[in-house]
Image: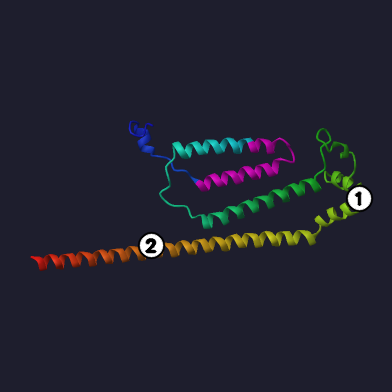
């Protein structure tokens, strides 16, 4: 609105929408939600509200305020990078939560696990083990299998293969983009050659008529 009248706005210039930064902000919010939802059940709801509000704010900024970036974003490589960062964030959050639940004694004054604070060597994960002991045998066996190495390693391998698949697909998109750019350059050269030939023929005809 004040781009033509305000010297300060002219000096700063129009703002570009930073897509990579927006994606990193979403990953950061998701990581905070993973880390904090065990200690505060309202954090997932707060994260949902934040994402909804930020979506509409950023949408308004893109449509009304921001200008397109001069440098195009290569989605082929960015997609794999963002998924890798999100996977690493999930692994770190799961590792920290697993360590705290399995090793740190519960609080004696507050929290749903304070009834176990008087027991020697009690940890918060005892709630899960005591609950699982009351399950049927089949369900208990399935739950115990989920905590073994025989289940964890295939899941990690599957995630790595999935990331490798997305990386290969990104490389394929990148190669296709390069081929299309080369094809456009060749078409441009062909058009220039044809225009030069047409101009040459027109010049020869004009000389013959004269």
39 left or right of 30 in image: right
Is 195 contained in the magenta span? no
83 left or right of 198 in image: right
User: Alpha-carbon neighbours of circle 2 within 10 Å: few (<14), some, or many (≥20)?
Assistant: few
Q: Are marks 1 and 2 in contact (CB under 8 Å)?
A: no
Magenta region, residue range? 19-48
> In x, y percent, where is residue 91?
69, 52
Residue at coordinates 65% horizontally, 42% vertically from top-left? Answer: 32
Give whichever of 205, 162 is nearer the camera. 205
Q: Which residue was labeled with disc 2? A: 184
> In x, y percent, where is residue 57?
53, 35
User: Alpha-carbon neighbours of circle 1 within 10 Å: few (<14), some, or many (≥20)?
Assistant: few
> In x, y percent, where is residue 128?
85, 46
Label located before the other in sequence (1 or 2) = 1
For discs 1 and 2, the disc positioned in front in the rendered view: 2
Q: Which residue was labeled with disc 1? A: 136
Is 44 contained in the magenta span? yes
């Amino acid at each position: 609105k004040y781009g033509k009248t305000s010297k300060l706005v002219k000096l700063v210039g129009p703002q570009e929408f930073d897509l990579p930064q927006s994606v990193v902000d979403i990953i950061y919010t998701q990581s905070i939600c993973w880390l904090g939802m065990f200690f505060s059940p309202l954090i997932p709801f707060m994260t949902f509200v934040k994402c909804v509000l930020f979506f509409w704010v950023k949408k308004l900024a893109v449509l009304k305020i921001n200008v397109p970036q001069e440098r195009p974003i290569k989605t082929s490589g960015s997609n794999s990078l963002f998924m890798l960062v999100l996977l690493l964030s999930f692994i770190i959050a799961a590792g920290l939560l697993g360590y705290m639940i399995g090793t740190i004694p519960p609080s004696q004054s507050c929290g749903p696990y304070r009834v176990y604070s008087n027991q020697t060597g009690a940890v918060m994960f005892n709630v899960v083990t005591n609950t699982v002991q009351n399950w049927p045998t089949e369900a208990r066996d399935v739950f115990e299998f989920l905590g073994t190495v025989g289940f964890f390693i295939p899941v990690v391998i599957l995630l790595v293969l999935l990331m490798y698949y997305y990386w290969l697909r990104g490389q394929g998109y990148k190669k296709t983009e390069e081929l299309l750019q080369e094809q456009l350059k060749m078409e441009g050269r062909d058009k220039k050659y044809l225009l030069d030939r047409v101009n040459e023929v027109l010049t020869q005809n004009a000389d013959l008529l004269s």
